[in-house]
């Protein structure tokens, strides 16, 4: 029988004002996420969401320890980070790259930061995809 979990590297890239910090954690993830399951499959999505929030809960203190700037939008103290995962769990060495942006937790700031991440994400994701593709060739 295949093992139930596989170790995956969660690489956090934390955008802290003008600084960028990196943090890597290894966590076991359900084997289902590393197999050929379709990401549009509900069971896959639910399993990923549960796994990702469990990993984020475990890494929360380490991520927050890296944050030294206040909320980029309003200058209030940072409460949490908004996270956007890029999932490469089907690689021989499974990994998830997590963009993390600190926020005060205010609704307007959260929405603006999320929007920034989507804009930035579409550029960075493309670049990271190219790097990953180059790495796989
Ligand atoms: Zn704010």
Image (spheres, helix red, strand yellow):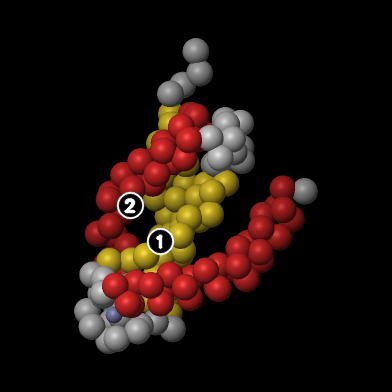
Q: Under tag 2, what secondary structure?
A: helix
93 relative position to 55: left or right? right
Q: Earlier in the sequence, mark 2 or mark 1?
A: 2
Measured as percent of width and height from the top left, residue 28 is found at 40, 36
Q: Under tag 1, what secondary structure?
A: strand
In this rendering, is residue 91 above or below 73? above
Picture quadrant of residue 20: bottom left
In this rendering, is residue 37 above or below 116? above
In this rendering, is residue 50 above or below 63? above
Say the numbered circle drawn on residue 93. Answer: none
- Name the residue tied to disc 2: 56
Q: Are marks 2 and 1 in contact (CB under 8 Å)?
A: yes
Q: How many marks?
A: 2
Measured as percent of width and height from the top left, residue 58 is found at 28, 49
In this rendering, is residue 21 above or below 60? below
Residue occupying the point 35% across, 83% down: 72
Residue occupying the point 41% across, 38% down: 46
- Name the residue tied to disc 1: 83
């Amino acid at each position: 029988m295949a093992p139930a979990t596989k170790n995956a590297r969660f690489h956090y890239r934390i955008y802290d004002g003008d600084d960028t910090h990196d943090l890597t954690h290894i966590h076991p993830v359900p084997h289902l996420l590393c197999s050929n399951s379709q990401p549009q499959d509900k069971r896959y999505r639910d399993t990923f969401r549960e796994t990702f929030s469990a990993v984020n809960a475990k890494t929360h203190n380490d991520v927050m320890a890296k944050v030294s700037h206040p909320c980029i939008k309003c200058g209030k103290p940072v409460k949490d980070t908004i996270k956007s995962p890029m999932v490469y769990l089907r690689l021989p060495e499974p990994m998830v790259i997590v963009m993390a942006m600190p926020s005060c937790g205010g609704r307007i700031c959260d929405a603006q930061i999320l929007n920034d991440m989507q804009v930035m994400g579409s550029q960075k994701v493309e670049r990271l995809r190219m790097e990953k593709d180059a790495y796989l060739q």
